[in-house]
Image (cartoon, grey):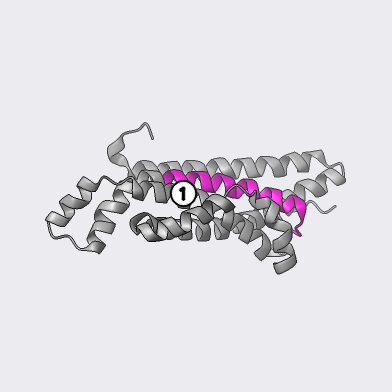
Amino acid sequence: MRTEGILIENSWATLQLVYFGFTGGSALGIIVGVITGRIAIFGKLFDPLVSVTYPIPKIALFPIFVIWFGIGFLSKAVVVFLAAFYPVYIHTFDGVRGVPELHIWSAQNFDASRLQILTEVVIPDSLPQILSGLRVGLALSFIVVFSAELIQSDLGLGQLALQARQFNNYELMFSAISMIALFGVIHDRLLLLTRRRLLYWQGDEH
């Protein structure tokens, strides 16, 4: 089993999946969460669909995506996308629905446009919930990508750990597992740092 540079190569493959899936899933989750949270009819139509599909383990859908998209990048990226979408959507939806009506009425009394109400009242008030959803979605993205790579993949830390186990290379196996844990911690800390800067008025407890 080749070992030279293999940890870096597989780490980059895993990070690409996380970045692609998490970014796309989070962006869609925020957009849909804001729309359904602000427009009641959309919320009533979409929220039951989420309630039905959210409990399904996203990794359980991976074999279906392999059939549709093959064992390459796309099938794993879609699983990560879904893993990030749901928690971000739910937190955004709850955050938007939880904006006090008094804040919106006050903005309307100052002749604020709908766009101004959205960008200057709704989203700032919802930001703590949105960021919490992003943190959950990020953690799930790393969990799901590693699991998907264990099941079927040509590259990635999950596949590397599995191959290392098969060749009794336990040092490399634990290195792959440690790398996914390290990446999770680093990205979580970066997200918390971003949260503290965006929510500076809430103090250091966040």
Number of numbered discs on residues:
1
Q: Is residue 150 visible?
A: yes
Where are the magenta residues, as a range?
Answer: 131-155
Residue extending furthest right?
167
Per the picture, the main secondary structure of the magenta-coloured stretch is: helix
Q: Quadrant of the C terminus?
A: top left
| Front residue of 79 and 195 | 79
Q: Seen in the image, is 188 located left or right of residue 78?
A: left
The residue labelled by disc 1 is: 90
Query: Which image quadrant for residue 115?
Result: bottom left
Q: Which of 113/84 is in front?
A: 113
Q: How crowded is mark 1: few (under 14 residues within 10 Å), some or many (20 or more)?
A: many
Left or right: 165 in relation to 180? right
Magenta stretch: includes residue 124: no
Closer to us: 107 or 4: 107
Residue sitting at 73 percent across and 63 percent down? 66
Residue name at image x 44 percent, y 41 percent: 192
Q: 17 above or below 144?
A: below
Q: Which residue is drawn at 20% across and 63% down?
A: 113
Where in the figure is residue 106, as x and y percent of width and height?
Answer: 16, 50
Q: Is residue 140 magenta?
A: yes
Instruction: Pinpoint residue 199: horizontal percent, then vertical percent.
Output: 32, 42
Indicate whether 107 appears above or below 66: above
Residue 143, percent from left and from top:
63, 45
Q: Which residue is more in the foreground, 34 or 27?
A: 34
Q: Position of residue 110 (x, y in %)?
A: 12, 56
Q: Dividing the picture into quarters, in which one does residue 152 lie?
A: bottom right
Q: What residue type is labelled 1?
A: Ile
